[in-house]
Image (tube, rainbow, N blue to C red):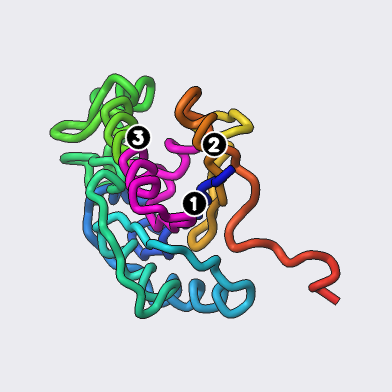
Amino acid sequence: MQTYTIYFIRHGAVDESNLGRYIGTTDVGISAKGRSALVEISESFGYPDADRIYSSPLRRCTESCGVIYPGREIKTVGALRECDFGKWEGKTAADLAGDPAFAQWLQNSDKTPPPEGESGRDFAKRVCRGFERIVEEMSADDLRTAAIVTHGGVIMTILSMYGLPQAESYRWRMDNGYGFAVRITPMFWMRDRVMEVFDTVPFAPKPEEEK
């Protein structure tokens, strides 16, 4: 039976995120250190090849694609953008301390959006619709493999919604430049909307390869 394999990869590190700022839809590129780290990971382990490369349209993802998959055509998908933090974009938790709206958002981000931003529930709906369209496209175009270079929040949301083994989103956290490999079996996907998370990305070397 034909299956589809998708590699989720979190974009390279950016300076702003290291400072603890909310930069969901803020369009910043990867830092020099983030770029170097991607090169090192690629040279040490190698990223898996794929029939098609998908990316969030934000620069930190498209620039990461250029490092990980140099020379490849990239298909950007708007639904793969990180959560929109609205008026809180670029601010830190310290900046927002004492704001009642921020306290309310921390208690229930699913239902409570940031001012002019996106609630967790709306974010999840948008991301999941986009991912399901990618799976449909892979089937229609007869693609066996795809790589999705996007944001940590996007990956965690998708895996918590569809991944087996089932786990809360925080269980699917990953460092910049790393991610997970999933396998979709059409019968189970059509019936239950589930997929198997079978490895991390890049693939860890086998014991015999380390010798």
Q: Amino acid at mark 2?
A: Met
- Mark 1 highlights which residue? 6
Distance of label 3 from label 1 (alpha carbons): 15 Å
Residue 99 appears in view:
no
Q: Is residue 166 above or below residue 178?
A: above
Tell me, yes or no, whether the two marked residues, 3 and 1, touch with CB atoms within 8 Å. no
Image spot of residue 91 (x, y percent): 26, 47
Is 145 magenta? The answer is yes
Q: Between disc 3 and disc 2, whose residue precedes?
A: 3
Residue 93 is marked as none
Image spot of residue 169 (x, y percent): 50, 34
Image spot of residue 75 (x, y percent): 28, 60
Q: Is residue 28 above or below residue 113?
A: below
Q: Residue at x 28, y 48 (%)?
A: 81
Is 24 magenta? The answer is no
Query: Magenta span covers which residues?
Result: 131-159
Q: Amino acid at mark 1?
A: Ile
In the image: residue 148, left or right of residue 211 = left
Q: Amino acid at mark 3?
A: Cys
Residue 195 is marked as 2
- Mark 3 highlights which residue? 128
Q: Which quarter of the picture shows residue 86? A: top left
Q: Is the residue marked by circle 3 packed among few (<14), some (14-19), or many (20+) residues within 10 Å?
A: many
Q: Residue at x 65, y 61 (%)?
A: 203
Q: Residue at x 43, y 36 (%)?
A: 157
* Element under disc 1: strand
* Element under disc 2: strand
Q: Between disc 3 and disc 1, whose residue precedes?
A: 1
Q: Between disc 1 and disc 2, whose residue precedes?
A: 1
Tell me, yes or no, whether the two marked residues, 1 and 2, touch with CB atoms within 8 Å. yes
Which one is closest to the eye, mark 3 or mark 2? 2
